Image (tube, grey):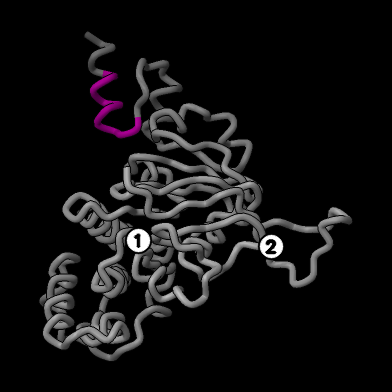
């Protein structure tokens, strides 16, 4: 598999002055090593303060590690001369879309990134149209973003990143401020980008049912990776997850309480298992 993003023994602290020799450093992430390959769909879980948002900001040079290396397509994020190149490979979508939308017309906002790359106007036009169609927002291209719903705004923000043609997109709790309909819109859009374009996705979330849709789940605790594996395996660790303030998908919890066989993640799987058990 082709590596897009790699963390090698990464440490980062928000403390302006630290004294590691005195043991006074509060590491937001520590001893963090993981790799994201092209085509991965990864959910990152953890309670507040676990380090998951720090992981997101380290992924495209918003933050620079104090120790260790973060590399994007082999480029160290410490190389300040290549920060723009790094962000072309790894795009970021934040929690509040209003903080990411910079223009007063949808298509102008999506064009902002490609314009900063100095691309030809015809190429920008093509990228903007393709990105808006990919996220289902093409018919809103001439609308004002402030008149859109939360889910629609977040899809516009994703289109703005998509127009940069990254190989990986990191979503930092991008559904946290949305209602169920908006959350569903964003999740469907992200899954489509992954399935149709082979884009690597790192999806940071508080919602267990969202994480269950990923191909791989990483659980963060006190700045370290606690679990890293397939959702069906990670969510079997019910007691350990609850110990760190997390839960499991409702279908998984119900299946375990009923003693149903197999590793169940969805309501459909749970229903089928109940029917089989009654036969």
119 relative position to 7: left or right: left
How far from the left and from the top, in percent, is residue 61? 50, 69
| Closer to us: 204 or 279 | 204
For the C terminus, the quadrant is top left
Q: Secondary structure at mark 2?
A: loop
The residue drawn where x is 58% and y is 38% is 226
- The answer to whether residue 270 is magenta is yes
Q: Is residue 114 visible from the viewing direction of this image? A: yes
Q: Residue furthest right?
A: 22
How far apart are the two marked residues, 1 and 2, measured between alpha carbons? 24 Å
Q: Earlier in the sequence, mark 1 or mark 2?
A: 2
Q: Is residue 147 visible from the viewing direction of this image? A: no
Asked if marks 1 and 2 touch (Cβ < 8 Å), the reply is no
How far from the left and from the top, in percent, is residue 272? 23, 22
Q: Which residues are magenta?
A: 265-274
How far from the left and from the top, in percent, is residue 15? 74, 67
98 relative position to 225: left or right: left
Q: Secondary structure at mark 1?
A: strand
Tell me the tag on residue 13.
2
Specify few, some or many for label 2: CA neighbours under 10 Å numbering under 14, 14-19, or 20 or more.
Answer: many
- Report the magenta stretch's main SS: helix
Q: Residue furthest top?
A: 279
Q: Is 146 located above or below residue 243 in the figure?
A: below
How far from the left and from the top, in percent, is residue 96? 42, 72
The residue drawn where x is 42% and y is 54% is 5
Q: Which residue is mark 1?
A: 169
Specify few, some or many for label 1: CA neighbours under 10 Å numbering under 14, 14-19, or 20 or more.
Answer: many
The residue drawn where x is 44% and y is 22% is 256
Q: Residue furthest bottom?
A: 104
């Amino acid at each position: 598999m082709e590596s897009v993003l790699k963390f090698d023994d990464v440490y980062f602290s928000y403390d302006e002055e630290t004294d590691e020799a005195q043991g006074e450093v509060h590491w937001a992430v520590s001893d963090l090593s993981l790799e994201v390959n092209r085509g991965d769909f990864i959910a990152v879980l953890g309670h507040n303060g676990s380090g998951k948002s720090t992981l997101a900001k380290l992924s495209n040079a918003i933050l620079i590690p104090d120790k260790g290396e973060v590399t994007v397509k082999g480029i160290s994020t410490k190389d300040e001369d290549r920060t723009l190149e790094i962000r072309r490979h790894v795009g970021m979508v934040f929690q509040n879309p209003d903080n990411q939308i910079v223009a007063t017309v949808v298509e102008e906002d999506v064009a902002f990134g490609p314009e900063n790359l100095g691309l030809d106007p015809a190429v920008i036009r093509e990228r903007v149209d393709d990105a808006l169609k990919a996220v289902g927002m093409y018919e809103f291209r001439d609308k004002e973003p402030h008149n859109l719903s939360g889910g629609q705004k977040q899809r516009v923000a994703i289109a703005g990143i998509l127009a940069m043609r990254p190989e990986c997109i990191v979503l930092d709790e991008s559904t946290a401020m949305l209602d169920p309909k908006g959350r569903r819109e964003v999740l469907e859009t992200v899954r489509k980008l992954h399935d149709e374009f082979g884009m690597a996705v790192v999806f940071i979330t508080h919602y267990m049912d969202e994480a269950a849709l990923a191909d791989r789940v990483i659980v963060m605790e006190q700045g370290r990776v606690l679990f890293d594996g397939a959702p069906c395996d990670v969510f079997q660790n019910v007691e350990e997850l609850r110990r760190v303030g997390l839960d499991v998908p409702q279908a998984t919890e119900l299946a375990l309480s009923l003693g149903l066989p197999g590793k169940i993640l969805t309501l459909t799987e749970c229903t089928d298992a109940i029917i089989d058990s009654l036969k």
